[in-house]
Every structure is written in C-alpha cells, then in structure tokens.
Amino acid sequence: MILYLIVLASSFIIASNSKADSIVRIKSFVQKVDERTPWKREQVRTISSNALVIDKDLLLVSSKVVDQSTFLEAYLGQDASPRTLKLEYLDNNAQLAILKLPKPSDLVPLTFAENVKPNQRVEVKNLRNNRLETLKKTIREFRTIRSRTSFYPLPVMVMAKGGRSVMNSAPIFCQKKVCGLVIHQNERELLALPSPVIRKFLNNYRSNIKDFAKMGIATRTIPDSLFRKVKLKNADLKGLWIERVFRHSAFRNTLKVGDVVTQVDGIPIDRQGYLEIEPWGKLPLSGYTWKLSSTKPIELNVWRDGKEMSIKAKPSAFEGGMDPIPLLNGRKRPFIIINGIVFAELTRNFLYSWGAKWIENAPMALSFSFLYGEKKPAVFIANVFPRESNRVYRAARYDIVKRVNENEVGNLAEFLNQIQLAFDQKQKAVIDMGPIPLEVILDLSTIAEQKALVSQDYSTNPEFFWLPN
C-alpha cells in the first residue's frame, strides 16, 4: 500500500496554466514510406504532439513528429482554427526539428537550462485536449540511444513512466527552465533529450550549420588475447580497441585496426569502455559523440604496440559530411520503373531500413558502396517485377548500375539521361551491373506498352514509370 502511494504521488497530475502560452498542440498528417517498396502508397494517419515555443513564430518538436509528414498544423491556445506549419529546420542526428508559423504570434518563448543532473526532481508538462498537466518525476539515470532515423548516438535522461503516457515532444522543466524534451516512451520509461543537446541544436540552427559530428570508427572492448598479452608485461591497459576505421573518418590516415584508445580529450576510458562524463556519470564513448564539432579538433590518446601516442583531428559532420549518399526527409524517394525493373538511387534511408546492424544485414554490394566505394551517388536495382521477360534479371536485385551503353553513371538523373539518349538514337539500353557482372538489356521501342502492362498487372501508379521526352 505504501509503495502504491509513493508511485501515485510521483505521477500526481496537477492542472496548471503557468506555461500554457509556451506549449502548443500540433497535428501531423503522416504517410509513411516503405523504403524497399517506395512505389506503394500507405494510408495517411494523424499524430498529435506537443511543441515548444522558441520564438514568436518558431516551434521546437521531436523529429519523429515531422518524419514523412505530408501536412502540419498548430492549435494556439483556445483558438479552434488551426495554423498551417512549415518545416524550418531539421537535424535527424539531434532528433529535433523547428517548425515555422505563418506569422508571429503572442506566444512566450521558453528558455533552456544549462544542464541537468541524475536524481534531480523535474516536472513533465503534458498538453492534452487544451489542458496542461504536470507530472512530477525523478531523473533515474542517463543512457545512450541511437536515432531511429540516422542511428546517431545521443545521451538521454531516463524517468519512470508511472503508468501515465505523455504526448510526444512534451517538455521537462527544472524550476522555470526547460531541461529536457521527451522523444520516446515505452511501457515503463520516458526517455528525453537533455537541455545541453537541445542548446547545441538551437545554436546550429542559428549558425545555419549541421554540426553533430562523428569520429567514424567502430570500437569494442579489448580482446582477451591482447589483454593477457599486455598483462604479462605488467601493463594496466584500459580503453577501447579499434575494430574498423571508416572512409569518412577524420582518423582514416592515423588510426589503425588494433589500436587502443585510452583517453578522449583527456577523459580516461575504463576497461568496460565507459567515460565519466560530468555531471551525468558513466556513459559509453557514444555518449560523448554529440559534443564533437567539425570546427574543433578532438584529441585521442592511443596505445599501439606498447607505445602511447596522441592523435588530433577535426571530426566531419555526420549528416552530409564526406559521404554523397543522402539521408532524405519526407515522402519523396528517387526511383523510376522501366520495363518492370525498379531503378533507385541509393539513400541512407534504404540502408537504415535494415536495422541498427545494417552494415551486416543490408545487401553487401550496397553497404560496401556506402562504406568503401567511390565518393559519388549510386543507382541500383531495387526490385524486378516477376514477369517472363525479366526472369533472367532477378539475380541483379540490389546490384549497382556501373555503365549505360559504355557511359558511366552516378545519380538517377545521369542514369535517365543515358536512357533518353539510347531512345533518341533508337538503340537498346545495355546496362552493366556490379559487383556481379551482368548485362541488363532494355528494349525501349515498346516502352509505352510495357508501362501500361506493368502498371495494370501490379496496380502501380503510372507516374512512377519512365517515358521518353
């Protein structure tokens, strides 16, 4: 009984209007994309959410609210008429977005706390049906999670849910300032971005940059074989073992597989791979990543073959960065259907659709193109509709287009230019695929008839098919 009263008190709801002019209810109309079948239309559904006022005409929300949305609207105070919103700024790595009202309002902008600590008492403000509720919570711990959109690691503060759900993007207050924003919840917990991450996102917006950087390395705890070998020499080796250095990494010419990173910017790494990050406590290396900037060098202390050395480099911005394969927002996906074969431009959205371990799970040709291929976009065969004329090409699914009629192509626009050229010259389009050597030959003389047949047989929107100019 006592435990029940404690839980009830921790989630006690208090009606309040003190922040009503700074929190807005919004509605997004979402039509999700199946990354592997983007030619299919899914049903539109609506999602309600909270939004934080950061300026007279700007609102802050979780990126989940705007992901693949077709329309956004806001309800201000008791005004029943919605205001149409536009996406002003989005960073999938920060899991945050800024929306713009059609004109300035009388809303009161919120301020954000410098930092927040474990075991701190906070208030979650939940605007539901024009009624602002307050849920009292305690920050239990800090943890690292990855964005569901870009798999960028971010620290989050964890609170007990207490049986009461909250709206997405609900703000968390430490006294009179915002110290967090709810981005995810499950049956037991609320997960929220802490205010330092939000402040960095807002600074990036004001500077018109995207500066959530990444080191571009894969690490693991020190292998037992190496640990035993070092221990025989009476050395106390602690840190993270370098498992892979990616091509976009700022350390691609200085770090090697088998190196051990012992410190990051002077912060020691323990034997389990954790750093002591004040005031949040122990977090893995990924919990420090969000602090990196492409304008400021990061210093690594590295152990290699029994010797200690120091390495400095400026990390590259993760989104965009040195990689030409984009991360797209909204519904639009670059693909086209020709004679029942779906040609698509490779995106990170497609690769990430294979889950957190996409490097291992995604088709090898595509993941290797992203990680180790030439620094240019790529077109691949996303699907082959099961027709008798296409049977021989089904093995080419997920292979990459190298050339069309001996001319190299990169993005989808270059590919279609070569297809148009072949049509104008009354030639067949001979497409060289890779890494498995295969020729895909398209007869363009019957392109209109093929479009009609495939569109009808597979109930596919005719606008997704290529026709010559």
Image (cartoon, rainbow, N blue to C red):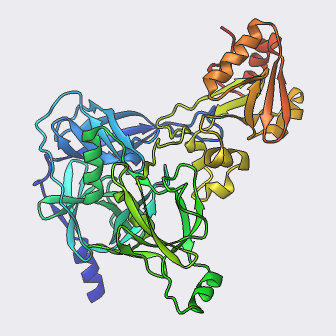
Count numbered badges in the picture.
0
Left/right placement of residue 344 relative to residue 199 reads right
Left/right placement of residue 381 relative to residue 311 reads right
Indicate whether 163 appears above or below 91. Answer: below
Quarter of the view holding residue 431: top right
Residue at 78% from the left image edge and 6% from the top image edge: 425
Residue 51 in sight in this render: no
Rendered location of residue 14, percent (x, y): 16, 64
Rendered location of residue 147, percent (x, y): 45, 55
Indicate whether 43 appears above or below 422. Answer: below
Residue 252 in sight in this render: yes
Residue at 79% from the left image edge and 34% from the top image edge: 433
Q: Quadrant of the N terminus?
A: bottom left
User: Between residues 174 and 252, which one lies in front from this camera angle?
Assistant: 252
User: Between residues 315 and 134, which one lies in front from this camera angle?
Assistant: 315
Quarter of the view holding residue 280: bottom left
User: Between residues 53 and 454, which one lies in front from this camera angle?
Assistant: 53
Rendered location of residue 3, percent (x, y): 29, 86
Q: Quadrant of the C terminus?
A: top right
Indicate whether 4 appears above or below 93. Answer: below
Left/right placement of residue 352 relative to residue 22 reads right
Residue at 37% from the left image edge and 41% from the top image edge: 90
Rendered location of residue 230, percent (x, y): 58, 86
